[in-house]
Image (cartoon, helix red, strand yellow):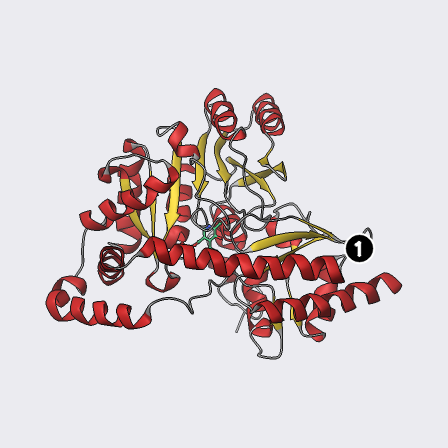
Amino acid sequence: MSTPSHGTRLDPWFDSYAERAHGMRSSEIRALFAVASRPEVVSLAGGMPNLSSLPMDHIAEISARLLRDRGTRALQYGSGQGEVETREAILDVMQYDSIRVHPDDVVVTTGSQQALDLVTEIFIDPGDVIVAEAPSYVGALGVFRAYQADVVHTPMDDDGLIPEELDATLTRLKSEGRRVKLLYTVPNYHNPAGVTLSLERRPQIVEICRKHHVLILEDNPYGLLGFHSDPMPALKSFDPDGVIYLGSFSKMFGPGYRIGWAAAPHAVREKLVLASESAILCPSQLGQLSIVEYLNTWDWYGQVKQYRGEYRTRAEAMMSALSEYLPMCEWTKPEGGFYTWVTLPDGLDAKAMLPRAVKNLVAYVSGTAFYTDGQGGDHMRLSFCYPTPEAIREGVRRLSQVVRSELET
Ligand code: PMP
């Protein structure tokens, strides 16, 4: 049998892939999952929410009732945009972000991950620029790569995106004749950086993007999970027509139903619905109706507060373990969410160190996963959302053994 001209022996279809498929890579996080999920490994790598406090008996009851009384609707196809009652319930949730839009401007999606895909599909031609925070959510970078976007990172500090730097980046790109289509940002409890965009900077970021005619893609899955406070107003609240806002039930309820949403300017919303219909026909009816039932029959905001307390306790365990065991490192101090971003001492390489960490039964994600340009080797993302406080402490202790031994070699 002859081998294709540019193919590999392992994959006879190599030459047949579309060009964009060649840019697809397995995420560093997915590759880690197999090792990190071994029970003896303390995983500070994954971002799985901790669902142990969900009212499972109540959820079982409403699920049974839903299937019994409205089963033919729950198991049927539905609207490509999402059911009206889901979109109305989503407006109630977005009030906490000071967003006031019409239910017609909301598109229900299969998690906010699908919304990221749809937005990229309708805006990005190969070579178009997406400006994104340095570092950025790995799942968004994967989508951007699949559509052959050119991602340009712009720096953050402890108060999130730096307005002057963003302005300078956009000005430079324009002077180079580059077409910047989107600013992708996670303003609250950033994944992976753990920082939050300050209130003062929010209108400034919006104004800079307006000046440069760049649409903002605001991704906010963690916004309700502030340890001490309700969310600050979303970027969308400052300029509803200049921002596509993405929300999700994954972190404030549970990711299993895979329901998220996009709130978009009217014309953009129409394109999103068309793109979503051709991708999935419609989001899960069962997922939507189950979530609406949960929101209507349970003190869901009370549950959000319960989550906040649990994540706060875990974040405190992480912060105190870092101070005790890794004083040679620096790290961000999250006010909510799931993550802290650790800077290693000079000369250490998080990616190279990872196999040794896993051997010492602790896992993290190397900072390189969160950049498109090879940066990040001196950083790691540690998540505190899933392990118990005791396991977090033990994980950081194991990590400190690895860091110390690296420093000695
Ligand atoms: N955006 C960010 C910043 C995330 O961290 C995640 C999940 N880890 C998502 C989007 C996707 O979440 P989902 O599809 O579950 O809504």
Asked if 79 appears above or below 35 in the picture, the reply is above
Element under label 1? loop
Query: Which of these two is toward me, 325 or 339?
Result: 325
Q: Which quadrant would residue 361 be assigned to in this image?
A: bottom right
- Identify the residue shown where x is 67% and y is 59%: 320
Q: Is residue 409 left or right of residue 302?
A: right
Asked if residue 32 shows in the view, the reply is: yes
Which residue is painted at 27% across and 59% down in the image? 298
Residue 252 seen in the current view: no
For residue 274, above or below residue 302: above
Q: Establish if 30 lies above or below 154.
A: below
Q: Which picture quadrant has residue 389?
A: bottom right
Q: Residue at x 24, y 54 (%)?
A: 282
**Residue at 37% across, 40% down:** 122
User: Residue 337: horizontal and vertical position, in percent?
Assistant: 51, 52
Q: How many marks?
A: 1
| Relative side of 285 to 391, left or right | left
Q: Residue furthest right?
A: 408
Residue 7, image x, y percentages: 56, 62
- The kind of residue tagged 1 is Met
* Residue in front for this viewpoint, 312 or 265: 312
Residue 111 screen position, x and y as percent: 37, 54
Q: Name the image quarter holding residue 259.
A: bottom left
Front in this rendered view, residue 167 or 392: 392
Q: Quadrant of the C terminus?
A: bottom right
Q: Which residue is mark 1?
A: 328
